[in-house]
Amino acid sequence: MEKSPVTKLVSNRLKFKLYLLQKLPLALIAGLRIKEFDGKMAAVSLPYNYWTKNPFRSIYFAAQSMAAELASGLLAMHYVSSQDKAVSMLVLGMRAEFVKKAKTSSCFLCEDGDKIKAAVQACLQSNEGQTVEACCTGWDKNKEEVARFWFTWTFKPRQHN
């Protein structure tokens, strides 16, 4: 696996919690955890708890979105942070499909690391913005699909003044 600042961050539980506290406090409060990360895929767990549930006894769609975005965002951050040149990244769009009620803790998996890597490399080679759509699938404790999210990420080379 390529060593990047993100790889080091997610491998240290305390540093990652401090990062969430500083940059993504709602993710920390919700209890998001990195289950697995290898640069090609990322899995983020989302507990069913007081902070993530809705009045309908399931996980609130916004909490699911947050976990799914983090899964794809970690991959994006991994490839952006491992470049010699500065690259900006931003979510350009998001769409979702809710397959079944998420009534237990869930895990959101994004396996589009190769697609994201190619977009970041193309951005730097062409010196132009690139977009890529990453898919994240959510699974409950019973290994049943609960939701699918698609995030459109945009990458642009940063211009230095």
Image (cartoon, rainbow, N blue to C red):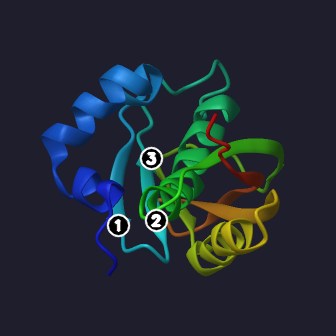
Q: Secondary structure at mark 1?
A: strand
Q: Is residue 39 left or right of residue 156?
A: left
- Distance from Cα at disc 1 to Cα at disc 2: 6 Å
Give 123 or 78, whichever is nearer the viewer: 123
Tell me the residue at 64%/74% (across/down): 121
Specify whether residue 136 is in view.
yes
Expressed as whole percent of the image width and height from the top left, the position of residue 112 reads 63, 74
Mark toward the start of the polypeptide (3 vs 1): 1
Name which residue type carries label 1.
Glu
Q: Secondary structure at mark 2?
A: strand
Expressed as whole percent of the image width and height from the top left, the position of residue 81 reads 44, 56
- Distance from Cα at disc 3 to Cα at disc 1: 16 Å
Q: Residues within 10 Å of mark 2 (few under 14, many from 20)?
A: many
Q: Residue 105 shows which numbered tag?
A: 3
Locate the C terminus and report the quarter of the image it occupies. top right
Tell me the residue at 16%/51% (across/down): 12
Q: Residue 36 shows which numbered tag?
A: 1
Instruction: Tell me where residue 60 sits by quadrant.
Output: top right
- Distance from Cα at disc 2 to Cα at disc 3: 17 Å
Name which residue type carries label 2.
Ala
Name which residue type carries label 3.
Ser
Q: Which residue is mark 2?
A: 42
Q: Are marks 1 and 2 in contact (CB under 8 Å)?
A: yes
